[in-house]
Amino acid sequence: MDLSVSVGPLRLKNPVLTASGTFGYGLEFSRYGDLSKLGGIVVKGLSLKPRQGNPMPRIAETPCGMLNAIGIQNIGVEAFLKQKLPRLPHDRTAIIANLYACDEAEFGELAGVLAGEEGIAALEVNVSCPNVKSGGAAFGRDPSVVHRVTEEVKKRSGNTPVMIKLSPNVDDIALAARAAEEGGADAVSAINTLVGMAVDVRTRKPALANIVGGLSGPAIKPVALRCVYQIARAVSLPVVGLGGISSAEDALEFMLVGASAVQVGTANFIRPDFAFDLVDELEKLAGELGIESLDAYRGSLET
């Protein structure tokens, strides 16, 4: 079966990508499978300068999920381009750079550094990060800011496709998706984590040093499915779905409600080989269900 799919101008050999922040720079998982087997690798969030991230503890397990407050720890874009990208199989799978910045100009500058680099197939823009010019409020909560960030990144990205990663922590995620579309995005991905917290009744302390963090894993899958469904009905952009995918059936559910491809996140921590196996499991399940084309299956939910 041909598993290839299109996400706007980006053609993927299969719809299985890894989610930013859950798969390192990709190289860390090469011991668990052939990286080139994946449809794509979204590397951990990159900033212009290296970031140390938040203090420990910054990960906590929750029922059916995980809280994290890593704080976008990364080596910075220049070190990534020199030390990591040349070692990734960018000629055999799509390498997607995830961008982290705190204002529109910084997003544009980062896009300018990455766009056009050999081996970068697309840019994913994290608009869930704090907007320093708006007092720390997340970009994704304000559609007008999403629009401006998208426009700024598109100005500097040349022919490199741009995907905007949307936050579910809003009243209406479709508004943010429309803002991204009007700003010129080539695709959107949804969802980022939900804001949550965990506490310990014995120590009387929060589980995370940051007190609150981002909830991911199977607990958020119903929210993610709803968001992808709403976005797919609101815009003509391709949608990449993520949020609690831990089986081939989960992946097909996202495609059924309108996703063109999926990203695997928290499941990578539970089974480091899961994303690799998902490619085979997806092909097997699609065959069992008589699905001849994933592009044709996409959005075929009957309501």
Image: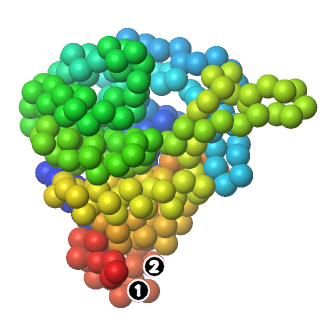
Crowd band around label 1 with a 10 angstrom C-alpha radius: few (<14), some (14–19), many (20+): few
Mark 1 residue type: Leu
Do the numbered discs 1 and 2 sit on residues whose CB atoms are within 8 Å? yes
Which quadrant of the view contains residue 256? bottom left
Q: Locate residue 70, reporting x and y percent.
A: 56, 27
Q: Nearer the viewer, residue 202 or 270?
A: 202
Quickly name the residue at label 1: 289
Q: Locate residue 239, reporting x and y percent.
A: 28, 55
Element under disc 1: loop
Instruction: Report the side of 156 relative to 78 (left or right).
Output: left
Up the image or down, 252 lies above or below 102; here it is: below
The N terminus, quarter of image: bottom left
The C terminus, quarter of image: bottom left
Instruction: Report the side of 80 relative to 265 (left or right).
Output: left
Crowd band around label 2 with a 10 angstrom C-alpha radius: few (<14), some (14–19), many (20+): some
Residue found 19% across the figure and 56% down from its top? 235
Element under disc 2: helix
Instruction: Report the side of 188 relative to 276 (left or right).
Output: left
Residue found 79% across the figure and 25% down from its top? 205
Q: Which mark is residue 285?
A: 2
Residue found 26% across the figure and 61% down from its top? 232
Identify the residue at the far top of this view: 49
Instruction: Report the side of 250 relative to 233 (left or right).
Output: right
Which quadrant of the view contains residue 286? bottom left
Identify the residue at the far right of this view: 202
Q: Locate residue 231, reporting x and y percent.
A: 29, 56
Residue found 30% across the figure and 66% down from its top? 258
- Camera sees residue 221: yes
Mark 2 residue type: Leu
Q: Nearer the viewer, residue 13 or 60?
A: 60
